[in-house]
Amino acid sequence: MTLNALLFDVDGTLADTERDGHRPAFNQAFAEAGLDWHWDVALYGKLLSVTGGKERMKHYIDHYRPDYIKPADFDALIIRLHQTKTRHYVALAERGGIPLRPGVKRLLQEARAAGLRLAIATTTTPENVTVLLEHSLGPGTQDWFEVIAAGDIVPAKKPAPDIYFYAMEKMGVSASECLAFEDSENGLRASLGAALKTVLTLNDYTLDHNFSGAAVVLSDLGEPGAPCRVVAGPDLGQPFVDVACLRVLHSV
C-alpha cells in the first residue's frame, strides 16, 4: 500500500511542550488559584504516565497529596484549573516560547510538497494545537492539517487508540496508508493499537520508555546540518528524515 498520510502527535513530538509549556502553565494556574501545588521537572515526568491534563491533576491529588481535602466541587475545580492552565499555555505559545523540535517544520513542508496528507492526533486541547501551529509554524499553518483530532473529541485518551481511529475515519484512510509520529510509550501504544507503523522521536521525559514495535526510534527528525541519532531500528542511510526515508520505513 502506498504511503498517503502522516498523523502527528503534538506534545513532545512536534515541540517540547510538556516541560517548557504545559508544566509551567499548570504551575501558574495553581498559583493563581491560591493552591500550594507545584510540579517540578522531575515530578512532572512521573505525572506524564497519565494522559490528559484533567486526569493528570486528579492522579496527582490521589497519589501525591493525601493531605489535600477535596472540596465538594472538586471536579468543577479541576475543569476551572484546566481552563486557566490553557490560558497561560496559549499566552506562552503566543510569545513564541515553545519552538518546534529539530526537523519538524522541514519535514512538514516536504510532505506537503510531495502531496502527502497531514493530520493531528493528540490528547491536548484544540486551542493548544492551534496556537502552537500558528506561532511556531506561522499564520494559517493549521490549514496544513486535514484533520485536527484533539482533546476530549473521543472519550478514551491515549494509550487507547481511539483518537487515531477517529482521525483516520475522518480522512477516509486505512492504517496501511499511514505513518504515525509519537514520542512516548503511551502514544506508541495508541498508534500500534490502531495498527499504524510509527516513527518515534525521544525527548528528555521518554528516554526510558518501552518503544518495542516502533518502526524506528530516533533522537529527533534531524536537519541536513544537525544529524539525528538512530536509537533503535534500521539505519536511515542519511542524517535526517525526509519523505523518501518515510516511504522506505512504510514499505518495510
Image: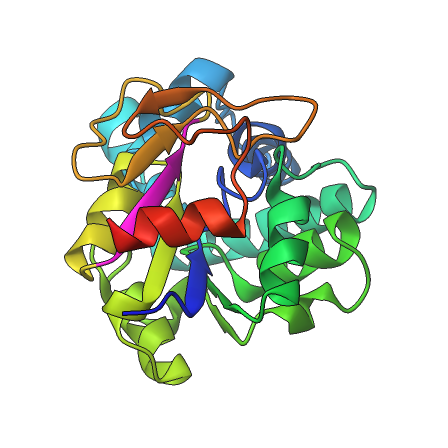
Residue 195 lies, in percent from the top left, at 18, 60
- Name the side, left or right, on which 104 lies relative to 162: right
- Asked if the stretch drawn in magenta spans residue 112, the answer is no
Q: Residue at x 50, y 17 (%)?
A: 40
- Name the side, left or right, on which 13 lies relative to 212: right
Residue 106 lies, in percent from the top left, at 67, 46
Q: Residue furthest front?
A: 237
- Name the side, left or right, on which 56 lies relative to 191: right
| Residue 222 vertical placement versus 22 (above, below) | above
Q: Quadrant of the N terminus?
A: bottom left
Residue 31 lies, in percent from the top left, at 62, 32
Q: Residue at x 51, y 39 (%)?
A: 241
Region rendered in magenta: 196-202
Residue 54 seen in render: no
User: Which SS type dominates the magenta stretch?
Assistant: strand
Q: Residue at x 64, y 55 (%)?
A: 110
Q: Residue at x 20, y 57 (%)?
A: 160
Q: Residue furthest top?
A: 42
| Residue 147 vertical placement versus 44 (above, below) | below
Which of the pair 174/24 is nearer the observer?
174
Which of the pair 187/176 is nearer the observer?
176
Residue 227 lies, in percent from the top left, at 58, 22
Which of the pair 219/54 is nearer the observer?
219
